[in-house]
Structures are given as structure tokens and as C-alpha cells.
Image (tube, helix red, strand yellow):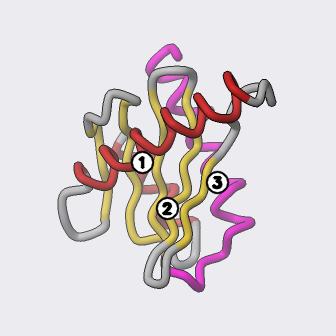
Amino acid sequence: MDEILKTLVDQVEGATGAAVGGVDGLLIEQYGAGGDLGNAVAEHANLLRNTRAAYTETLQTGDLREMMVVTEKMIGYTQPIGEEYFVLLLLEPIANLGKARLRSQDAAKGLREMIGA
């Protein structure tokens, strides 16, 4: 997992860190960001659960494929890995979002194969 996350961060300009988390809010693995990403994973897990409930169940729009939270100082891009896990990529506001989406999909595919999700 560490190598996949490292590759993801290294290949996206403006990426500062990446993590694999469970929808239960627990951090599984992280790379970069200069600190513990446990709180970021927990918050994004909560957002992911609520967004899935709102869109998939209530609005019946189909499966959630990606989620992005944009703040003044950071972008949190979430790519689900099956129903139980997700990859979180933290980015600077000036990051290349197109590349972030593409490389996150590649990482999610590799992680999905690794964990059997």
C-alpha cells in the first residue's frame, strides 16, 4: 500500500499526502502530509457515508464514484475502493485536479486488487 500511495503523491503536482481509510473512519495506511492523517480520514469517512446516503439511497443516483472537498487552504479528493474503503488524496489549492483524478483512479484500482474489494 505504501508504494501505491507514494506513487500517487509523487505523480500529482501539488499533492501533499495520501491515505487509505475505512468507511468506519479508521486510518489503514498513509504517505506524506507531514503528520498523522487519522483525523482527515475520519472526517472524510463521515462525509463519504453521508454523501452516499444522500445521493445513492435518497436521490437514487447510483454509486458514488468520487468526492472532493475544496477549502481555502486544501483540497481533499476521495476515491472509493469498493464499499468499505477509500483513498484520500490531499492537495494544495493549485494542484492539477485532472491528474489527481486520473492517478487516484489508478491507485484505487491497484488497492482494490491488493485488498480484494
* Secondary-structure class at tag 2: strand
First in residue order: circle 1 vs circle 2: 1
Residues shaded magenta? 92-117
Residue occupied by mark 2:
76
Q: Residue at x 24, y 53 (%)?
A: 39
First in residue order: circle 2 vs circle 3: 2
Residue occupied by mark 3:
103
Q: Main secondary structure of the magenta part?
A: helix
Label 1 vs label 2: CA separation? Answer: 8 Å
84 sits left or right of 36 in the view: right
Q: Residue at x 27, y 39 (%)?
A: 27
67 sits left or right of 41 in the view: right
Q: Position of residue 105 (x, y in %)?
A: 66, 44
Please name the amino acid that badge 3 sits on: Arg
Residue occupied by mark 1:
44
Please name the amino acid that badge 2 sits on: Gly
* Secondary-structure class at tag 1: helix
Answer yes or no: do the residues labelled 1 and 2 have beta carbons within 8 Å? yes
In-front residue for pair 116/71? 71
